[in-house]
Image (spheres, rainbow, N blue to C red):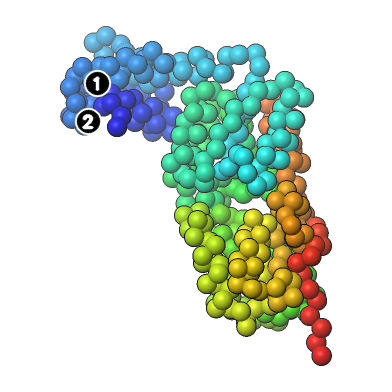
Amino acid sequence: MKPKYQVIIDDIKSNILSGTYSVGEQIPTESALQDSYNVSRQTVRKAILELSNEGFLRSEKGSGTYVSNLYRSRTGGNTMKKTIGVITTYISDYIFPSIIRGIEGRLNEDNYSLLLASTNNDVAQEKKALEMMLSYGVDGLIVEPTKSNLYNPNIAYYLSFKEQDVPFTMINAFYEELEVPFFCLDDVQSSYLATRELIAKGHSQIGIIAKMDDLQGKYRMKGYIKALGEAKLRFHPEQVLSFDTASKPDLSTNLEVFLEENRDALTSLVCYNDEVGLEVVHACRKLGISIPDELSIIGQDNSYIAKNANIKLTTLTHPQEQMGRDAADWVIKKLQGKKDLPTNTYYQPVLIEGETVKEIVLE
């Protein structure tokens, strides 16, 4: 459990970094903070002293305590070498090492430092990461949004970056509430091409597994529905398995139930990504469903796990390293004062044939 003075420090710091308290604004009095937190005057003074030492507050004798922005010059902001913050949902798995490698490679060319944080797709952890970046005084920021298909309670922090003229861009997805430059795969097109490939191979009973708290999942669902519509195939809600970050640990179990229930109805599946595609392969092996003879599947993202699996997954490309490099290049050019930079960049996916799709021959 946090000491009481630390709770006060964290709350005041959050209010400053999110812009709730503006620079120069007077914070509540010591007695008001005492009442608010139900603590002693000594505890309040300890918190204020520490925040003053860190440059977040300044006290004027006989007047009160005010918000300061000295913390910005005491951290990374005053060094000759510029620092770019990078916040991703995950760091060490799936496509993220390749994206980070692309960012790092480009930053190194211009002697920029990288400050890395991850959120585990959790908004509370995103808040901590944003506060760290603001406290440190990063010169620019690259963010992969957290639960991008849901309302984000951390929007105020992004607006603080804008107010401070700190350039930032988003990768893989974006917050629709914000006007923000982004670098994304064309996720609608990715799922559209996957579904169209299955239709071209004679499949008409096509299901989808979609992650619905991320914008990528929403758009990949859209591409699937678009391809079905063009082919005059019915959309069957019971042939959709949706999941989110919270339910992901139960995906294996839910997949088995879904596959068993649709055993006679489905001939193919569009998977949210390669990771899910390989979960389907695993579940099918447990249930004795042959891939691709009984069920064809297509992943998405052309990840290293798809390349190294013991079955060659049919998938679609994702720019990964190039996306990271381009996002870093955008931030560097913005800091150099370049004008007319792109506000949004979509990369076009390409189908990569594997061993997991079978053509259905009508007799």
Q: CA distance from mark 2 to mark 1?
A: 9 Å
Say whether residue 337 is visible. Answer: no
Residue 114 position in % (x across, y down): 64, 26
In the image, what residue occupies the spot 52% across and 46% down?
A: 121
Q: Which residue is mark 1?
A: 44
In the image, what residue occupies the spot 57% across and 37% down?
A: 87
Q: In terms of image quadrants, where is residue 192?
A: bottom right
Report the side of 200 relative to 104 (left or right).
right
Residue 147 position in % (x across, y down): 52, 50
Q: Residues within 10 Å of mark 2 (few under 14, many from 20)?
A: some
In the rendered image, the vertical position of residue 104 relative to residue 75, given as above or below: below
Name which residue type carries label 1: Val
Quadrant where the C terminus lies? bottom right
Name which residue type carries label 2: Tyr
Report the side of 306 relative to 256 (left or right).
right
Report the side of 127 relative to 65 (left or right).
right
Q: Which residue is mark 2?
A: 37
In the image, what residue occupies the spot 55% across and 38% down?
A: 118
Say whether residue 264 is visible. Answer: yes
Q: Residues within 10 Å of mark 1 (few under 14, many from 20)?
A: many
Labels 2 and 1 touching (C-beta < 8 A): yes
- Disc 1 secondary structure class: helix
Residue 257 position in % (x across, y down): 52, 72
Number of marks in the rendered image: 2
Report the side of 226 relative to 120 (left or right).
right
Which numbered disc, 2 or 1, marks the residue that appears first in the sequence? Answer: 2
In the rendered image, the vertical position of residue 239 relative to residue 69, given as above or below: below
- Residue placed most toward the observer, 150 or 342: 150
- Disc 2 secondary structure class: helix
